[in-house]
Image (spheres, rainbow, N blue to C red):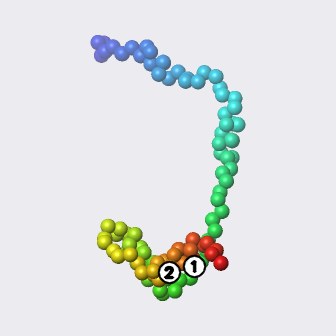
Amino acid sequence: MPTFKRASLAGSEELFRPTRPQVVTDTDDVTRDAVDRHEKVKEVVLRTLHFTPEEIELLLEAVQTAKYPDRPRSKPALDKFDSLDALRIKIQGDTAD
């Protein structure tokens, strides 16, 4: 094939030149600082709660009310309202003694 000519690759060495001509000397320190970083972890406190069947019914009704807020409902009776408030205090772990 005497008529075949290669394309000139002049300028392609520019694509492969090093982007950072000097070696960074503090690379190990920067990497070590990033890897050895210790984050403060908030301690998780687990509690066990015991509910009566009446409290479970109240929780189910509260979930239904929260799930469908657009449905028209009457205000809860005062004793039911107090029960819901006591249940909220029990779940949040507040000490109202």
Residue 49's label in the rendered image is 1
Q: Please report whichever mark, 1 or 2, sits nearer to the chain's N-terminal start.
A: 1
Q: Is residue 56 visible?
A: no
Q: Does residue 56 appear to the left or right of 43 in the view shown?
A: left
Residue 68's label in the rendered image is none
Q: Marks 1 and 2, how far apart in space?
A: 16 Å
Give the total number of marks visible in the rendering: 2
Image coordinates of residue 74 in percent, x first then y, are: 35, 76
- Residue in the foreground of this view, choosing between 6 and 24: 24
Image coordinates of residue 22 in percent, x first then y, are: 64, 22
Question: Could you tell me the amino acid type at mark 1?
Answer: Leu
* Outermost residue to the bottom: 53
> In the rendered image, which quarter is residue 80 located in?
bottom left
Residue drawn at point x = 42 percent, y = 81 percent: 77
- Locate the C terminus by quadrant: bottom right
Residue drawn at point x = 67 percent, y = 47 percent: 37
Image coordinates of residue 5 in percent, x first then y, are: 33, 13
Q: Is residue 15 visible?
A: yes
* Outermost residue to the front: 78
**Element class at badge 1:** loop
Residue drawn at point x = 64 percent, y = 68 percent: 45
- Could you classify mark 1 by the number of other residues whose Cα lies within 10 Å: few (under 14), some (14-19), or many (20 or more)? few
Q: Is residue 24 above or below residue 1?
A: below
Question: Could you tell me the amino acid type at mark 2?
Answer: Ser
Residue 83's label in the rendered image is 2
- Could you classify mark 2 by the number of other residues whose Cα lies within 10 Å: few (under 14), some (14-19), or many (20 or more)? some
**Element class at badge 2:** helix
Image coordinates of residue 61 in percent, x first then y, are: 40, 78
Q: Does residue 97 appear to the left or right of 68 in the view shown?
A: right
Do tag 1 and tag 2 residues touch (Cβ < 8 Å)? no
- Residue in the foreground of this view, choosing between 5 and 47: 47
> In the rendered image, which quarter is residue 31 located in?
top right
